[in-house]
Image (tube, helix red, strand yellow):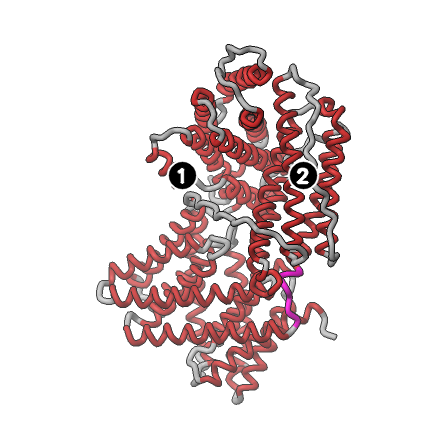
């Protein structure tokens, strides 16, 4: 029996050897290009991920070939325009390659375009032959990889997807138990029900589902049901946030007389999640109780805040009951256990630019111009090779968050020395193809076997690719064993990495400390814009302000919170003894909570506007949102928050009087339906919680000494 540790190295080594030998047998000039395709596709979690990456590699290769043809066709005789258009194309590709769904397409497009432009030497005939050869080699590599990984121990994405869903439903059962305890006054207040973990699950699901559609017929045949399931999971995460809001505002004693109804509803929800686990484990039927609407007894009719929180809790619990019923029904349809009329899933509207991705594109653009300058003005051996290697390495490094360039360089030098020793002392004695195949098989197997841990993926990638790069002379149709060429490549790689190191450290630094502080500062403006956008959404004018604001600050604050959390995890904490890691983690948790409040506010405000509310009330809400936005933009201006809180309390009191018909001359001057009152309560509650969270966030930030992160090795 083959051990689990040996299976993946055997598959990678076999696919790589098959690709190189097949290219030599077909008489193609650059077999190592087929080997690169195999190596890159192997660094994935499942067969579905690999096949999807292979498709993207083919599409990216095609885009890169066409782009190279266009550059040579239009600007072959105009050097400046050629370089200018190429660098802007490279910056565009670097910006797009950060996209989780299509990023690899643009990464491949840039690499292939650079290879063909440099190796084609702006000659139409040579460029065309290089482009065709690249396509052939890529297709061969994808075919060899698919053949080997489909026949030998395939790893199905469907199994990984099911295991992820099992852990999700188990976590939700725990959240339901926490909710029961919190509403009964026996547990802690709900803090977003693990909102950050819910976001990580959604990100994981968005990664696994497209891969599972590629290698699983069962998933692909029910794609619409799975897409609907993903949308419902997003709605579930948002409803959990609304539930935590109602719980924070509500005194558990208020719902004491409705505990039986609440516990029965949550028991139905938990029963559905238990059934979902059973279905995923292979059960043929599920227990899906019919939702039952509940009406909580209002024990706080005289308290505006408690009354509003009671109404909100009632609505959220009923929504959770309905949504959990739909989730289980959709899951059964996705597993082909039931039929379901799937709703058409609307695509999410595109958001504004990601400022972090703009910084990455700008850094890559600057690096490329430095490499072009070295090629044009520094008399160095290798010529335009420095541009080709520099563009490829720069696009890879800037796309890796918190990339340690020194570690990568040390790994490259170490692997190069090991491989060059074999290249100089062993490979010149090869006289048969089977000897060459054995060499690549044994080396590739050794690299993937000895560096099999998940955290060693970088070593596997670098070792495998340098194995091909440093020995590419030996796999030509006429083998050339030139140690000087391999040493020249190593020298150029070292020079390119030196440029990348200084630019990456100095311009929009990728150090975890700088990334953390940059996104903490950016979040202030993102939160402020989200509030300002609400104040502008009800107005017909100011289209230009909305357009530019959405373009520059329209990205979701969640991106910055996630990046700040990742940067915090990468910090070298012993260097900052005055920093308390628990306090910084508390800031991240508070940022997640504040993001949840903003999502809740946007959701409630959109519902409020859709119910044809009074213009006067909408104007008051817009003024409060605009004022709060101004306070967020001014750090530490907390004295202006108290008047806003007082105004919200007054509005909540007047709303309570209006609903209870206590004061017909209320400032609202409108008669609200129960549904309109609920949405207005939700908006006011979200605004109050945002103010409370911002106060706590400011005090936490001031007490955590974040200024210590500004100092690094180069600070005097």
Relative horizontal placement of residue 250, taking residue 41 as reference (left or right): right
User: In which quadrant of the rendered image does the N terminus lie?
Assistant: bottom right
Residue 158 colored in magenta in the image = yes
Residue 172 colored in magenta in the image = no
Is 42 rendered above or below residue 20? Answer: above
Mark 1: few/some/many CA within 10 Å (<14, 14-19, 20+): some
Residue 327 appears in view: yes
Q: Secondary structure at mark 1?
A: helix
Residue indicated by mark 2 = 321
Tell me where residue 75 appears, x and y as whole percent.
25, 64
Seen from the viewer's position, the closer of residues 398 and 609 is 609
Tell me where residue 557 appears, x and y as whole percent.
50, 39
Residue 688 appears in view: no
Mark 2: few/some/many CA within 10 Å (<14, 14-19, 20+): many
Relative horizontal placement of residue 5, taking residue 665 as reference (left or right): right
Is 512 rendered above or below residue 690? Answer: below
**N-terminal-most mark, 2 or 1:** 2
Residue indicated by mark 1 = 550
What residue sits 47% from the left and 54% below the top?
399
Marks 1 and 2: in contact by CB < 8 Å? no
What residue sits 59% from the left and 75% below the top?
148
> How far separated are the C-alphas under marks 2 and 1?
35 Å
Which stretch is magenta? 153-159
Tell me where residue 633 appears, x and y as whole percent.
44, 29
Is 676 rendered above or below residue 4? Answer: above
What residue sits 59% from the left and 29% below the top?
700
Is 652 rendered above or below residue 196? Answer: above
Task: Write down the quadrant of residue 259 in the picture.
Answer: top right
What residue sits 73% from the left and 40% below the top?
268
Seen from the viewer's position, the closer of residues 634 and 153 is 153
Q: Secondary structure at mark 2?
A: helix
């Amino acid at each position: 029996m083959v051990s689990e540790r040996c299976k993946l190295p055997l598959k990678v080594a076999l696919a790589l050897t098959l690709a190189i030998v097949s290219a030599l047998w077909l008489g193609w000039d650059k077999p190592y290009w087929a080997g690169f395709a195999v190596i890159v596709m192997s660094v994935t979690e499942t067969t579905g991920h690999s096949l999807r990456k292979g498709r993207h590699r083919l599409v990216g290769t095609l885009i890169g070939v066409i782009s190279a043809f266009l550059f040579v066709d239009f600007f072959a005789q105009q050097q400046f325009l050629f370089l200018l258009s190429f660098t802007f194309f490279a910056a565009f590709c670097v910006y797009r390659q950060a996209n989780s769904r299509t990023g690899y397409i643009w990464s491949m497009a840039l690499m292939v375009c650079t290879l063909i432009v440099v190796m084609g030497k702006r000659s139409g005939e040579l460029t065309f032959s290089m482009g065709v050869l690249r396509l052939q080699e890529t297709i061969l590599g994808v075919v060899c990889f698919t053949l080997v990984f489909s026949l030998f121990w395939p790893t199905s994405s469907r199994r990984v997807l099911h295991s992820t869903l099992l852990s999700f439903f188990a976590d939700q059962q725990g959240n339901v138990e926490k909710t029961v305890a919190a509403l009964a006054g026996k547990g802690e207040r709900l803090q977003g029900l693990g909102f950050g973990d819910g976001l990580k699950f959604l990100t994981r699901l968005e990664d696994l589902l497209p891969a599972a559609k590629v290698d699983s017929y069962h998933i692909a045949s029910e794609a619409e049901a799975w897409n609907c399931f993903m949308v419902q999971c997003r709605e579930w995460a948002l409803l959990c946030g609304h539930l935590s809001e109602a719980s924070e505002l509500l005194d558990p004693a208020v719902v004491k007389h409705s505990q039986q109804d609440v516990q029965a509803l949550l028991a139905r929800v938990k029963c559905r999640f238990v059934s979902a686990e059973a279905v995923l484990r292979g059960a043929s039927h599920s227990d899906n109780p019919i939702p039952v609407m509940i009406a909580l007894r209002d024990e706080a009719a005289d308290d505006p805040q408690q009354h509003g929180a009671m109404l909100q809790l009632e609505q959220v619990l009923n929504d959770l009951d309905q949504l959990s019923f739909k989730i289980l029904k959709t899951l059964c349809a996705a597993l082909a256990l039931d039929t379901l009329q799937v709703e058409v899933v609307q695509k999410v509207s595109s958001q504004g630019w990601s400022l972090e991705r703009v910084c990455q594109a700008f850094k890559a653009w600057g690096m490329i111009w430095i490499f072009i300058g070295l090629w044009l003005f520094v008399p160095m051996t290798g010529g335009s090779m420095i541009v080709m290697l520099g563009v490829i390495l720069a696009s890879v490094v800037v796309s890796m968050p918190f990339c340690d360039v020194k570690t990568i360089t040390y790994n490259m030098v170490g692997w190069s020395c090991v491989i060059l020793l074999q290249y100089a002392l062993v490979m010149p004695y090869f006289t048969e193809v089977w000897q060459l195949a054995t060499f690549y098989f044994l080396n590739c197997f050794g690299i993937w076997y000895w560096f099999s841990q998940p955290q060693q993926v970088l070593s596997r990638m670098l070792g495998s690719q340098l194995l091909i790069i440093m020995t590419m002379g030996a796999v030509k149709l006429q083998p050339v064993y030139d140690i000087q060429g391999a040493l020249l490549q190593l020298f150029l790689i070292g020079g390119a990495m030196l440029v990348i190191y200084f630019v990456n450290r100095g311009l929009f630094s990728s150090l975890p400390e700088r990334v953390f502080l940059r996104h903490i500062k950016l979040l202030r403006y993102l939160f402020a814009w989200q509030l300002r956008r609400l104040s502008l959404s009800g107005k017909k004018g100011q289209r230009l302000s909305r357009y530019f604001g959405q373009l520059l600050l329209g990205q979701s604050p969640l991106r910055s919170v996630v990046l700040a959390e990742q940067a915090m995890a990468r910090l070298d904490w012993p260097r900052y003894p005055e920093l308390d890691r628990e306090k910084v983690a508390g800031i991240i948790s508070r940022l997640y909570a504040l993001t949840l409040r903003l999502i809740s506010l946007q959701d409630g405000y959109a519902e409020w506007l859709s119910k044809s509310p009074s213009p006067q009330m909408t104007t008051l809400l817009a003024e409060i949102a605009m004022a709060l936005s101004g306070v967020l933009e001014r750090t530490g201006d907390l004295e202006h928050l108290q008047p806003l809180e007082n105004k919200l309390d007054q509005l909540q009191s007047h709303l309570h009087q209006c609903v209870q018909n206590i004061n017909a001359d209320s400032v609202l001057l409108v008669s609200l339906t129960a549904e309109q009152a609920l949405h207005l309560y939700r908006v006011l509650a979200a605004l109050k919680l945002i103010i409370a969270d911002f106060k706590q966030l400011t005090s936490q930030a001031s007490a955590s000494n974040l200024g210590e992160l500004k100092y690094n090795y180069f600070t005097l």
